[in-house]
Structure formats: C-alpha cells, structure tokens
Image (spheres, rainbow, N blue to C red):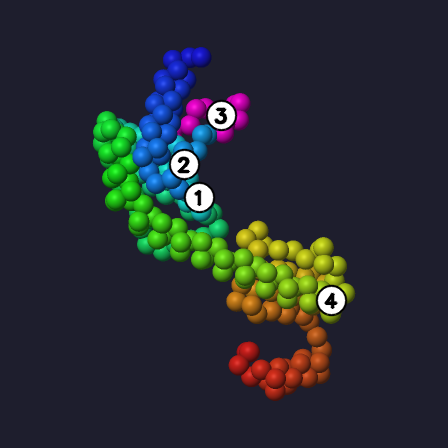
Amino acid sequence: MNEYLTERQAKHDALHTLAQQIAAHLPEEWTYQPPVLREEEYPSERAQITHTDGAVIHLSRGRWNNAGRLNVSGIYPSDVTLDGDHPSITLADNRPPEKLAREIQRRFVPAYLTRWQKAQEQCARNAQVRTQIQDVAEQLAGITGYPVEQIRYERSGFSATLSSNPAKLIVTYQGQVEIHATVNPTLACRLLKQIMEDAPDAL
C-alpha cells in the first residue's frame, strides 16, 4: 500500500472509530453503520449513523481551512427535492465523543428529523402519483389494445407513454392524458364537441 493509501486508511479508521463512539452516546434508535466497500474502492472518507426509521447522520472531516472540524449533515431519499436549507453543523473533532454526541443530539437531530419526516411524506406522495399514472396507462392500454409491457415510463415514473395507433398517449404527472393524433376534420370536430360537453374546463 502506497503512502497516500496508508494515510487515507488511517483517516478512515479514525473517523469510523469516532463515529462508532458517538453512536454509543446517542439514543438507542441510532446505530453506527459500518461501510461496505467493493474491493476496488478507496477507504471511505465519510461515516454514517443510521436511525431505525431510515434517517442517516453523515459525518466527514473538514478540509483545508475547515481542518480540525467534524462536518455533520443528513442524508435524504434520492426521490425527493426539499426546498430550503438542509440542517448541518460543524464541531471541533478533538472533543470527547460523548460531548460530540450531545451537541449533535441538541443542535442537529431535531431539525434533521423534521426535514426527514417531510421527505418521507413526499416519498409517499410520489409513490401514490406513480401508482395512479400506472393505473391510467394500463386502462388506456386496455382500450387501445396496446401491450402493457411496452408502456414506456419516464425514469422517475412520473409519466407514461403509449406510442400506439391511432394516437400517441402520454399520462402526465398532473394526472392528465395528452392525446397526440392526426384525424380528419369531421372526427376532430366530433371529438372537440364531445370534450366541450363532458369537460369544458379540460381545454
């Protein structure tokens, strides 16, 4: 192991030892999470302490002008986008673990868990939206005879597309259906009249 990796491994070990010690002084819902590294990965420069509900405290060492500090932040589901600042604090990393734990519990955890709860609520809403989009897309597939397995979902799952005859159909995040079709004027007038009678606010 070269000098760089030796130094990095030492920093990794020191940080994770500190994280484990801090976790021991937090409420029992928090547990130190050992890293799982692939063989080709460098030793991690961050450590995590997880809560029983999935929340994660993220610890890392300060660098350059922030050397000697322990950065404390939180991890959120990749599925959500929260407005506003995310709670974070920095602490002198040479303080005893029990004092670091006390400061984290007092200054960081309450604000972070509040944000985490909002993230969980947004995750639940997102899951509901995806289910609704899938239900509508499959209903449209049943009407048009389009193979369900060929419905193309956006990576996020917030829209679905059926590229079938006689029309291209897109189920949107708002729960609406875009219909892209080329029809003769007579049919266009009949469809438009039907829409205006059934749902005049749809246009």
Up-down relation of residue 199 to residue 163 (above or below): below
Sequence-first disc among 2 and 4 = 2
Whether pointer 1 and pointer 2 mark residues with C-beta atoms closer than 8 Å, the reply is yes
- Does the stretch in magenta take in 37? yes
Whether pointer 4 and pointer 1 mark residues with C-beta atoms closer than 8 Å, the reply is no
Pointer 2 local density, CA inside 10 Å: few below 14, some 14–19, many at least 20: many
Q: Secondary structure at mark 1?
A: loop
Residue 23 % position (x, y): 35, 34
Mark nearest the camera among 2 and 4 is 2
Rendering quarter of residue 169: bottom right
* Span colored in magenta: 36-46
Give the residue number, with chain letter if any, for mark 2: 31
Q: Quadrant of the N terminus?
A: top left
Give the residue number, with chain letter if any, for mark 1: 52
Rendering quarter of residue 172: bottom right
Give the residue number, with chain letter if any, for mark 4: 142
Residue sitting at 67 percent across and 81 percent down?
Answer: 191
CA–CA distance between discs 2 and 4?
48 Å
Residue 160 % position (x, y): 62, 60
Please give the label number shown on residue 41. Answer: 3
Please give the label number shown on residue 80. Answer: none
